[in-house]
Image (spheres, helix red, strand yellow):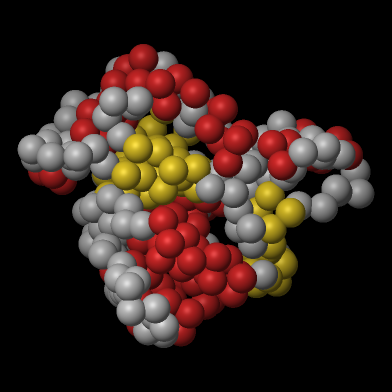
Amino acid sequence: MVPRILMLPGYTQNAAIFSGRLGALRRSLKDSAELVFIDPPHVVEMPTDPSDFKTKFDSDASAAPTSEADTPRAWWFAESQDGKYRKFTKFDETLQYLRGILEKSGPFDGVFGFSQGAACAAMLAALCENPSLDPIFAEPSSDPNVQWPPKPFQFAILSAGFFPLDPRTSAYFDTKPKTPTLHILGKGDTIVGEERSVPLTQAFDGARVEWHEGGHHTPSKASWRKFIQAYIEAFGDGGGGVEAANSLASPSGSGADTPVEGGKL
């Protein structure tokens, strides 16, 4: 069987937008993986300055949506404290929503997230390894037909991700999760800079990091599509698993770089 992957969109994206953004990769994977795109649960309200919507966020969703396909969504909303984003609101609802997805639509072999969705995927990987980290995941299922807790993901692909600074969520990483992770980061990313992205790579045991020359996006050149496809196929039947995935040559134009201790925080 091919790997089943839960796909988590970025801030102001939704399932339709994320699927469209990954169109070339999705076509490459049509025989290699089952990609399950889901909407984030919360609708993003129109900002005071409409120009902010196009210049600072992760998608071209409409500021005045007319359908689900162009409605901007989010996994949570961050409130700044002391100049840092440290308080997530509507996060309980997100965890309940994600638990419902895992219970009703799982199991999943992997998770793939972009930007805020990558931060969310990282936390979900930690919670699937150790549901006791949060009471919403620790509670036993009331449905005897549901497998709970879920199995840990075999892998997580985190594109343009960042370390979640809310004290509740950062505590998920006090012990480094062991889920194999592939971090895809842009050297020119001005939305999620190195000071935010590198700490997430350091939060996982044995993370693999690949840098591309672009900005805040998942690279779609043929060399990257082939690399991501091969990485995912490594976790399919007879694919060799994490050892095979980590032995893959870096895509052309990438600077493979496992982070060293003492990186920017």
Query: Residue 137, position in %: x, y?
Result: 42, 77
Quarter in which the N terminus is drawn: top left
Q: Is residue 254 in sight in this rendering?
A: no
234 w.r.t. 78: above or below:
above
Query: Residue 206, position in %: x, y?
Result: 22, 53
Q: Residue at x 34, y 71 (%)?
A: 146
Q: Quadrant of residue 200?
A: bottom left
Q: Residue at x 13, y 40 (%)?
A: 237
Task: Judge from the rendering whether residue 173 lies leftward or rightward of residue 2; answer left or right.
Answer: right
- Residue furthest to the top in view is 222
89 w.r.t. 225: above or below:
below
Q: Residue at x 27, y 63 (%)?
A: 152
Q: Residue at x 29, y 25 (%)?
A: 31
Task: Judge from the rendering whether residue 34 lies leftward or rightward of residue 80; answer left or right.
Answer: left
73 w.r.t. 81: above or below:
above
Task: Judge from the rendering whether residue 79 lies leftward or rightward of residue 128; answer left or right.
Answer: right
- Residue furthest to the right in view is 48
Q: Nearer the viewer, residue 215 or 6?
A: 6
Q: Nearer the viewer, residue 232 or 265?
A: 232
Query: Residue 131, position in %: x, y?
Result: 35, 76
